[in-house]
Image (cartoon, rainbow, N blue to C red):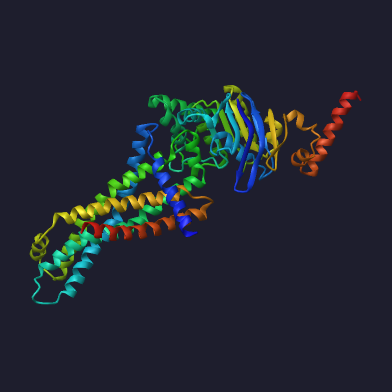
Amino acid sequence: MIEAKNVKKSFGDKTVLHDISCVMEAGKTNLIIGSSGSGKTVLQKCMVGLLKVDSGQILYNGQDFWAMTDQERKEIRTQIGMLFQGSALFDSKTVEQNVMFPLEMFSKMRYREKVARVNEVLDRVNLKEAHKKFPAEISGGMKKRVALARAIVLNPKYLFCDEPNSGLDPQTSLVIDKLIKEITEEFNITTVVNTHDMNTVMESGDHIVYMYQGYKQWEGSNKDIIYSKDEKLNDFIFASDFLRDAKEMRMIEMQQRKTGE
Amino acid sequence: MLTKKFLEHFGRYLMMLGGMFSKPENWRVYWKEFMHQCNDIGIGSLGIVLIISVFLGAVTTVQTAYQLVSPIIPKPVIAQIVRDSTILELSPTVVCIVLAGVVGSKIASELGNMRVSEQIDALEIMGINTKAYLVMPKIVAALIMLPCLIILSCFLAIGGGYMAGSLSGILSPEQFKQGLLQSFMPFNVYFAIIKAFSFAFIISSISAYFGYNVKGGALEIGKASTTSVVVSCILILFADYGLAAVFL
């Protein structure tokens, strides 16, 4: 479990996060949603420890991340996997070497065991024929899957994904979403996903935090989001006329079902 | 304003150097990275060092002969001048200025690209000290490989001078050999090595600093690469004068 407690973060005069508090639960796909510039990436970077909070706390299973010693922080970091927006694969390494890198750095496995583990996670993300290819030789969707394989190769307790669907077609996006959700449930990982992809919100949002201009505007699940009366959230989620109409139809349908008509 | 900016950069530079010293997460992976850098910096620069050195020696021989027209001055003096100017100045300084362009820009753009594409963030999230893993091997590799390249460059430049002298008939091979052995001071070689170490540190650490701290996109990587080469060259020239003033 990861908890943000009264987190504030500013860059110069501009305050990006205003007193944010939220809990990211284990075994659930926790989403941070919001429009561009709402502070969701900064909140995630604070959670993962890439940015230091100005005030407030980031708690990993009740332990304050910034109150830990360097060694304790290092240990927590080895339990974190992260999928970056641009995949962040090492250009000079092949797919296999990219996925093997955390194992080489942190595990005491023999080479054969490492290869077996790499094959296992690459199979898990449905990548079987790209082992010897370099990142420049594979598609965007494959890069995301390799990055996901690298993120989970050490069996992390915490998985962070920064806009995992950006630049992907809807079908590949769904594949990535499904993978993240399955892996989260399978290994009981605390997963935090930054997104503004509505498919992700509806399909895998077990727990959603909606950010608006640096404030936490709304919190709930994908089931609650349809019935939410929050105007800002509705404007964000149902941005197009098509989606707004779809929501209204769904509401009417639900009401009819309730009254038995 | 300028002083403040300089102090800010200098402080961050020192912090980067200080941050490199931590226990490696895995010695084997660090060793692999170090060997990779030795190959990139040393073997990768071999071609350019070879070409520059041979021609530097050849040109120095021809130009020295052109200026020493007096019949009183014996021909072997030409070889002596080529030897001393090569060891004291041409090989360490000129070759290092060229290497600031070749090696420095490569280090800056490699780290800059890693920063911009979030590869450095990815390493940090894994719990790896990126300064120790990415910067330290580059600096240590440069400190080992550049002096080797400079020593090689001295031999090649003298060889180039020998060839130019013999082929153009300026002085015979015997006269050249005689000149090479005349009043040779071993300290000059030590001085060249001291210079090579100092310049290697300047080239690798300055370009690593500018690359590591890139903010923005592809344009900024190019800017960082250019800045690192310019700053390295200026610092090499300052250090060149400083070392000469102190040691000679």
Residue B92: which quarter of the image? bottom left
Considering every residue shown, the one lying at the far bottom of the view is B70
Residue B107 position within the rendered picture, expressed as x and y whole percent measured from the top left: 40, 49
Query: Residue drawn at (46%, 41%), measured in percent from left and top?
Result: A90
Q: Is residue A202 visible?
A: yes
Left/right placement of residue B37 relative to residue A11 reads: left
Relative to the observer, which residue lies in front, A77 or A92? A77
- Quadrant for the N terminus of chain A in the image: top right
Query: Residue drawn at (34%, 52%), measured in percent from left and top?
Result: B202
| In this view, A111 is above or below A17 | above
Left/right placement of residue A106 relative to residue B42 reads: right
| In this view, A64 is above or below A37 | above
Q: Is residue B109 visible?
A: no
Residue B241: which quarter of the image? bottom left
Left/right placement of residue A113 relative to residue A51 reads: left
Relative to the observer, which residue lies in front, A126 or B46? B46
Relative to the observer, which residue lies in front, A206 or A245? A206
- Quadrant for the C terminus of chain A in the image: top right
Residue B34 position within the rendered picture, expressed as x and y whole percent measured from the top left: 34, 40
Relative to the observer, which residue lies in front, A229 or A103? A229
Residue B247: which quarter of the image? bottom left
Residue A58 position within the rendered picture, expressed as x and y whole percent measured from the top left: 59, 31
Residue A177 position within the rendered picture, expressed as x and y whole percent measured from the top left: 63, 33
| In this view, A255 is above or below B1 | above
| In this view, B70 is above or below A56 | below
